[in-house]
Each structure stands twice: as C-alpha cells, then as structure tokens.
Amino acid sequence: MGSKIFSGFGPNIPIKLYTSGTVETKLRSEFESTGINQTIHRLYLDVACNVSILTPYDVINNNISNEVLLIENVIVGIVPSTYYNLEGMDNNNLYDTVK
C-alpha cells in the first residue's frame, strides 16, 4: 500500500539466513588529533560476510558488513609552555622573522 502505518502487517513468510562462506574480520586502527596535547586512538573491528536468504520462492545472496568500535582511548601529552601557529607563512618570511 506504500504507507508506513501498515508496515509490519501482512502474511507471515518464513525466512532463513545461512552464511554461504566465511566471516572475514579485520582490525583497523585510527588516530585523531583533538588539541595541542591530546590524541584519540580508536580500534575498530570490520566484519564482512556473504549470506544467502532463503524464502519460499527465491534465494537471495547478499553481502553484509559492519564496523564495531572496540576501544577508544584519549592519549594526553605534556602541555607545551608556548605554541606558535606559523600557518600561511612561507620559508622566506620565516627566516626573516627569526633573524
């Protein structure tokens, strides 16, 4: 009918899921700078598998993948006594400023 009101209603059709191969996993590490002296380290587990969906009338093959966050850690360093932002300066201006 195309309406969200009737979603979930209808005939009960039995569906079974079977993995049609192996589950592939991969660990992925990510570092993100969050300030002058802080870094966030995240460790993810990427999971992917091929499944066959068995319905009474058809077999549908599909790839399912998901990303799971395992660990998130904030690494705090020493606070610097000074901070210089030299963005936008080329090398010639930098040497003139230092002299």
Image: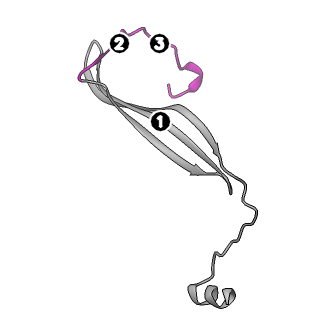
**Judging from the image, what secondary structure is the residue with disc 1 in?**
strand
Q: Position of residue 9 (x, y in %)?
A: 51, 13
The x and y percentages for residue 91 are 57, 85
- The kind of residue on which mark 1 rests is Tyr
Residue drawn at x 60%, y 22% is: 5
Q: Find disc 2 in the rendering and name its residue.
A: 15
Give the amino acid at mark 3: Gly
* Mark 1 and mark 3: Cα distance apart in space: 39 Å
Tell me the tag on residue 10. 3
**Residue 35's x, y, as percent?**
68, 54
Residue at x 25% of width, y 19% of height: 58
Identify the image quadrant of residue 52: top left
What's the residue type where badge 2 is placed? Ile
Please, which colouring scheme is shown? one colour
For marks 3 and 2 on the same chain, the one whose residue lies earlier in the sequence: 3
Specify the segment rendered in magenta.
1-21
Mark number, residue 44: 1
Foreground mark, 3 or 2? Answer: 2
